[in-house]
Every structure is written in structure tokens, then in C-alpha cells.
Image (tube, grey):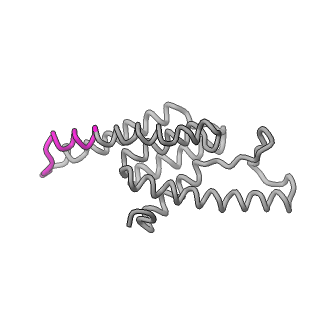
Amino acid sequence: MPALIVWILSAVCFDLKTFRIPNRLILFGVLLGELWLLLPLLLPGNTASVLQVLFLLCKRTLQMVCLWFLLYPLWRIRCIGGGDVKLMGVEVLFIGMLRCINSFVYACICCLILSLMQHLGHRFFAKSIPGLRKKDGFHQVHFSLPLLCGLVAEMLLGDLLFG
């Protein structure tokens, strides 16, 4: 999982700097996730057959696409950005659908806390908050940072919904 953490951390850095997550970074994450799934075939003494690994690869890729469609309405109503939707989809390749949904719930909780802190900070400290961007009358929170926090929380705390 360190590869996933480092990859999402790089996406967070891009997001904080440019308010965008580049598609080339998403593509690299997809390739990294699929290589992660193929890793059991490359290790010596593996017990997984080629068919089992290919089935898992197809299953996780289908789950990734399904998650993109599930999050599409949130993107359409501008709750989260398109890069964040793709980020969650790539996360599915590494940890699976249920754990990804759990990390999304943790991320939403983290985003709620960050939004509250940002709102209160803006209210009390006016315009002295670095990185605060106002667009269309709304203050935006980079959702990639709560996604990283949600993933770490899911790894440390485990299931919130399905346990």
C-alpha cells in the first residue's frame, strides 16, 4: 500500500498547487494499480494461477468503472471534482470496492471537519488563510486531501460501514 499512499500524496500536491489532478497522473495510477494486481504472478512461489489473477484484474477494473459512474452525479452537481472521482476509481484497484467506500466515508467526515475549520477560520481571520479559493460564491476545499486522510483512516481503523 505504500505505492498507493505515495501516488495519492503526489495527486494532493498537484491539486493544492494547481487545483487540478493531471490525467497523466491518473493513467500512471491505473497502470500502477494493475501492476499491483499482477504482482502475485511475478513473485517466486506464488500459488495464484494466471486465470485467478486475470479474473481479479477484470473484477477490480469493472469496480473502478462502476465507482466512476456512482460518483458521476456528485461531479455533475459540483460536490467533487473530476480528478477526485478518478482518484477514487484508481483507489479501487488497490484496495477493492468496499474498502474504497469506507475510505470515502472517512474522507467525507474529514472534509466536513476541514470545511468547518476553513469556514470558522475565514470568519474569524478574514482573508489571511493561504490557499483559500472563492469560486462562484463558494469557498472550495481540495477533496484530494480528505481522500488521502480517508485512506489512511481506513487502513488504520478498518471498516466503518461493513464491519
Total labels: the figure holds 0
Quadrant holding the C terminus: bottom left
Question: What is the x, y in percent for residue 142?
Answer: 64, 47
Q: Is residue 39 above or below residue 153?
A: above
Q: Is residue 125 left or right of residue 139?
A: right
Q: Is residue 99 above or below residue 14?
A: below
Question: What is the x, y in percent for residue 132?
Answer: 76, 48
Q: Nearer the viewer, residue 120 or 162?
A: 162
Magenta segment includes 50? yes
Residue at position x 37%, y 48% in the image = 94
Looking at the magenta stretch, what is its main secondary structure?
helix
Q: Nearer the viewer, residue 134 or 33?
A: 134
Question: What is the x, y in percent for residue 137?
Answer: 80, 42
Q: Nearer the viewer, residue 66 or 134?
A: 66
Q: Is residue 59 left or right of residue 85?
A: left
Residue at position x 38%, y 50% in the image = 97
Question: What is the x, y in percent for residue 158?
Answer: 41, 66
Q: Which residues are magenta?
A: 45-58
Q: Nearer the viewer, residue 162 or 38?
A: 162
Name the outermost residue toward the top: 24
Snapshot quadrant of residue 79: top right
Q: Is residue 102 left or right of residue 76?
A: left
Magenta segment includes 10? no
Residue at position x 77%, y 51% in the image = 130
Quadrant holding the N terminus: bottom left
Q: Is residue 145 above or below residue 15?
A: below
Snapshot quadrant of residue 118: bottom right
